[in-house]
Each structure stands twice: as C-alpha cells, then as structure tokens.
Amino acid sequence: MSRPRLVGISANLQRPSRTRVLVEAIAGAAAAQAPLEVRLFDLVDAGPGLGSAWTRSALPLPARRVVEAIEEADALVVGSPVYKGGYTGLFKHLFDLVEPGALANKPVAIAATGGGARHALVVEHAFRPLFGFFNALQLPTAVYGSNADFTDYALTDAGVRARVQDAAGQLAALLTRGLLPGIRPEDASAGSPVAAASR
C-alpha cells in the first residue's frame, strides 16, 4: 500500500529561509507521526520562468513539475513570507495555475512568516480565502512565526513550536485515519475526511 503524498510549498525566494524552516518543521513532524511520502519545494525550484508564464501551457519544465506535484499530492503544507499584509505575488501566481478542482477535500496546513506579530492575521485574511476557493480542507491550526521566533534560521520559540506539533498532529490524523484529533470514528459520517472533520 502506497504512503500518502505530502507536498510542502515554501514561497521563499532565497535559501536559507524562515518560511522553509516552518514548512519543513510541519511536514517533518507529520511524517514522524505517520508513514508519509514527503516532497518539499521552494519557489526557487520552479525557476525564473514561473513569473513569466501567463498560462499553464507556457510553464517551463521545472515550474510544471511543481504545479503537478501540488495537484497530485494527498495533502499540502503551504507557507509564504508576508509582504505588506499578504503572501507573495509569485505564491498566488503559482496557485493561479493549479486546476480549480485539484485540491478539493485535501488537507492543507498553512504557515507564514513575517517581521513581527502585526502580520499574523494574514493567515485568516489571505490564506484561508484562497484555499477556501479550492475547497481544500484547511487545518484548524495555522502556524505564524515572526523574526523574533527564530535564531539563525532555527525555530526557537516554544509557542510556535507547539503550534507546529498541533498542526502536524492534525495533518497526520487526517491522512491516516480521516479524522481530526478528538473526533471519534463512530461520531463521524462515513466517507471523506471533510465529513469527519466538519462535525
């Protein structure tokens, strides 16, 4: 039996990156709790052709592979640095090229990084509407980290690290049992994780 495919997308444009650290931490913690096949991408992996491709057919091969990995995943961990109250333009452009039905009912863990706490609401005001459009199953716990939560690109804040573990636990539970923690199988309707998690 194949393992669920978890794909992490970090919208950083350079390495190392605090955003990559958060995405990798959530994916790694989920994989520690469940047998998952994990693939991680930074936007730089898509190459410079991503921004110049106005249509999917114009995508160069590296960018097309990232889009296809997103669509073929069983779940996603997505993250972006925050610029002026929103995710990066290239992050949005990448998901503009994803088929609208490709993420339906798939669990998505959301992460973001910014200079300070004032950007934390980007998760609710920007990310959730985007993935709501895709009908994705967004995890209750999102993870935001500010610059002060990292030391030399290592996540050091205990509160943020606890949220990483919470999000990873929810992700692992959905991928392996179709349920969010705290929901008993007998309480959930038969069928998709969405039915189970929405009760």
Image (cartoon, helix red, strand yellow):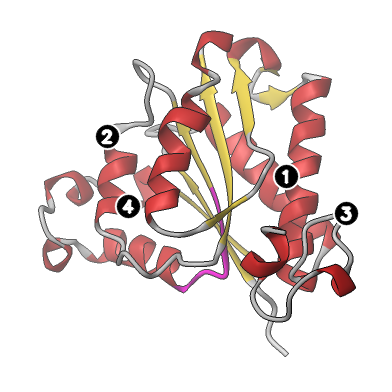
Q: Amino acid at mark 3?
A: Gly
| Nearest to viewer (mark 1 / mark 2) | 1
Which SS class for mark 1? Answer: helix
Q: Which mark is residue 182?
A: 3
Q: Is residue 16 visible?
A: no
Could you tell which of marks 4 and 3 lies nearer the N-terminus?
4
Q: Amino acid at mark 2?
A: Gly
- Would residue 39 be found to the left or right of residue 191 on screen? left
Residue 167, labelled with which disc?
1
For the residues marked 4 and 2, what is the alpha-carbon distance in whole angstroms?
Answer: 10 Å
* Residue 76 drawn in magenta: yes
Q: Position of residue 148 (x, y in %)?
A: 65, 10
- First reached walking from the N terminus: tag 4 or tag 1: 4
**Residue wearing tag 4:** 95
Q: Residues within 10 Å of mark 2 (few under 14, many from 20)?
A: few
Which residue lies at the image location 74% right of the left edge and 26% below the top edge?
A: 160
- Please provide the residue range marked out in magenta: 72-77
2 on left or right of 16: right
Question: Vertically, is 140 above or below 17?
Answer: below
Q: Position of residue 109 (x, y in %)?
A: 60, 48
